[in-house]
Amino acid sequence: MDEIGRRLADGITALNTPFTPEQHEKLLAFLRLIQKWNRVYNLTAIRDLRTGVDLHLLDSLTIWPYLRGERILDVGTGAGLPGIPLAVMSESRHFVLLDSNAKKTRFVQQAVIELGLANVEVVTSRVEDYHPDHGFDTILARAYASLAEIMETTRRMLAPHGVILAQKGQLPEGEIQTLKDSPVKSHRLKIPGLDVERHLIEIAIG
């Protein structure tokens, strides 16, 4: 195993997330795909694999313990983050990865095909125009919008007792105060090996 593979394996282990050698290899393959497509599609500002392990893969996997239910929606998925890493680690769940940028969803669809992810559906649409047939147990939003905006555009798509999980850097105390009618929890997240501030805001509906 090379340095990048070891860094990923050590990081997943530090997160107390069980994984198989196949899942480990799929995560690395996804990272290599991002690096390859970045040259043309400008998917992300992160160019090197080591930083990608930390800020793409492990940052995504920090929220794995908080996923709820079987149907997961990743709003504004961009390059497939956090949806694809979480789908790799949660093969029994169904993920919908939503983004309005067709260039990015073309990449995500290609990644889904190359990684053989039968549990992932890619949708090109603005969130306001997306009307799924069934609600979602968990809705993910990573650097997508303010908490109030996330609530406004996504709560209609939640299944009963569903939850919205919004990834943030610093704790957005002002944004949290705008959600007076919904139970809100904040979780301090730790990316193994990095000293950066990360919070997960958990918003329960019903």
Image (cartoon, rainbow, N blue to C red):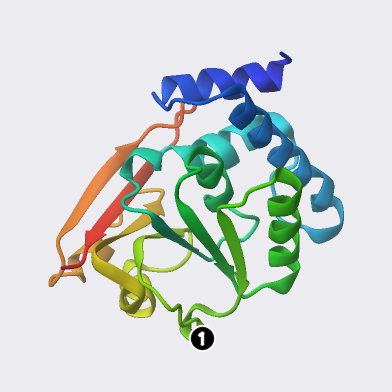
Disc 1: CA contacts within 10 A as few (<14), some (14-19) or many (>=20): few
Q: Nearer the viewer, residue 196 or 104?
A: 104
| Horizontal and vertical percent position of residue 76 | 54, 66
Dot 1 falls on a residue whose secondary structure is helix
Give the residue drawn at x 80%, y 60%: 41
In this rendering, position of residue 161 left or right of residue 50:
left
The image quadrant where one finds the N terminus is top right
| Horizontal and vertical percent position of residue 103 | 75, 68
Give the residue drawn at x 82%, y 52%: 37
| Vertical relation: 143 (above or below) 98 | above
Q: Which residue lies most toward the top here?
A: 1
| Vertical relation: 158 (above or below) 61 | below
Q: In the rendered image, which quarter is residue 8 located in?
A: top right
Give the residue drawn at x 36%, y 48%: 170
| Horizontal and vertical percent position of residue 23 | 60, 31
In this rendering, position of residue 80 left or right of residue 139:
right
Q: Nearer the viewer, residue 175 or 39?
A: 39
Q: Amino acid at mark 1?
A: Asp
| Horizontal and vertical percent position of residue 74 | 49, 61
The image quadrant where one finds the C terminus is bottom left
Give the residue drawn at x 48%, y 65%: 144
Residue at the spot of label 1: 129
| Vertical relation: 165 (above or below) 90 | below
Q: In the rendered image, which quarter is residue 54 located in?
A: top right
Q: Is residue 27 visible?
A: yes
| Vertical relation: 122 (above or below) 169 | below
